[in-house]
């Protein structure tokens, strides 16, 4: 009885109107992707195959989405060991001074 009871809310005017708008948006996205697919095929036929569709990533999003968590490893790779050692020494000194307060 739970599903029929909860499904009745789909008949509420605001919800029904929202679903109509969501359906219309989905239809527009379908049209957009069909055009993008046709364009990608046209480029491939001209000898320019695309590896990830006819789109691109925003530079910040690329790092934020795909390299999150790896940045500290990357920084460690490109930072000379003497710099890390100096930073570690200063941090240890600051911790020692703070703990003696």
Image (cartoon, grey):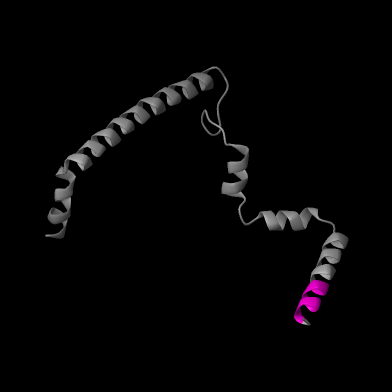
Q: Residue at the location (62% across, 50% down)?
A: 67
Residue shown at the point (55%, 26%) measured from the top left: 49
- Within the image, what quadrant is residue 90 found in? bottom right
Tell me: residue 79, above or below residue 33: below
Q: Is residue 97 magenta?
A: yes
Quadrant occupied by the N terminus: bottom left
- In x, y percent, where is residue 41? 47, 22
Q: In this view of the protein, which residue sits in the foreground, 11 or 76?
A: 11
Q: Is residue 84 left or right of residue 30?
A: right
- Horizontal and vertical percent position of residue 45: 51, 19
Q: Main secondary structure of the magenta part?
A: helix
Give the residue displayed 79% in from the left and 69% down from the top: 91
User: Where's residue 15, x and y in %?
Assistant: 22, 42
Residue 101 position by quadrant = bottom right
**Bounds of the magenta span?**
92-99
Does residue 9 show up magenta in the picture?
no
| 100 on left or right of 45 | right
Q: Residue furthest front?
A: 101
Residue displayed at 79% across by 82% down: 100
């Amino acid at each position: 009885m739970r599903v029929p009871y909860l499904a009745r809310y789909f008949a509420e005017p605001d919800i029904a109107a929202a679903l109509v708008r969501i359906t219309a948006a989905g239809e527009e996205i379908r049209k957009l992707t069909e055009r993008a697919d046709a364009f990608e095929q046209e480029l491939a036929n001209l000898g320019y195959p695309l590896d990830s569709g006819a789109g691109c990533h925003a530079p910040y999003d690329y790092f934020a989405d795909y390299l999150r968590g790896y940045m500290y490893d990357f920084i460690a790779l490109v930072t000379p060991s003497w710099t890390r050692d100096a930073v570690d020494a200063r941090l240890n000194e600051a911790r020692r001074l703070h703990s003696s307060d």
